[in-house]
Amino acid sequence: MKMVQVGAISTGTVIILGIALVIPAFMQPTQHLLVLLSFNIIDDENTPQWCKELSSLLTKHNVKATVFVTGTVAEENPECVSVFSNNVDIGSQTYDYVNLTSFNDYAEQLEEIKKGKDAVDKAGNLDSKLFKAPFGATDENIYSLLNTSGILADFSYQNQYNKYYNHKFLKFDSTAYEGLQKPADYYQGLKPEQGPIIINFDNEIPVEQIDQFVSDLKSSHIRFVSTSELTGIDLTVKKGEWKLP
């Protein structure tokens, strides 16, 4: 074989090997930090306007999120449930936003949870399967209460969320932060394996501040998720909405 041919073959082999080494790096799925924006809507005189502005903000940024509404807010301001797009999950947080552990009676706890869920469902014409306990306060009854109420996911805690699977609630690790407790660049510095991250806001925080925070937070490193996406369960079922089997 001529030396020119040998050289060409060797060069070609090096190029092929180089491509083979480089391609997998491009084909590897990008790792994202999963961020759940969670909003607690509690009774307030400016609630309807706040909900409308929040919905516009989330639509503008095209980010997924989750909103928790009390039963009283849902009854008095049903638009705080119906105004949000399909990218936003809707959950309940009892009827009166009360500490569940303050009740000595199981039936009273159950009524608070069921009444809150029913009010949210009626306001949005949906079946919400998502819950968050006010003040993060729960006791040994919580999983029985949620199961009886038809709720499949619980986001009451700072370091975990729970989803119903195979006839029981399973714990999954997460880390929750309050509102503007940390600047946006703090989350951008976190590694994907540290997620998922839950950032909680309530309707006392001006929407303008949330808007700026979301703008600063958005990056190729971060993927915004809803609770449905995080758990793999459809937690906000719109009644009358046709779905693939």
Image (cartoon, grey):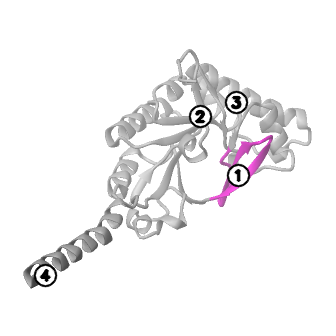
Kindly identify the residue that appears in the image at 64 percent across and 34 percent down. 70
* Start-end of magenta stretch: 154-173
Q: Is residue 208 left or right of residue 13?
A: right
Kindly identify the residue that appears in the image at 61 percent across and 36 percent down. 91
Q: Secondary structure at mark 4?
A: helix
Measure how far apart labels 3 and 4 are at the Cα level.
Answer: 77 Å
Q: Is residue 198 above or below residue 67?
A: below
Name which residue type carries label 2. Asp
Q: Secondary structure at mark 1?
A: helix
Contact between labelled residues 4 and 1, with CB atoms less than 8 Å apart: no
Pointer 3 residue: 116
Pointer 1 residue: 136
| Disc 4 crowd, CA 10 A, few/some/many (<14, 14-19, 20+) | few
Contact between labelled residues 2 and 4, with CB atoms less than 8 Å apart: no
Quadrant of the rendered image containing residue 245: top right
Pointer 2 residue: 234
Q: Is residue 13 left or right of residue 237?
A: left
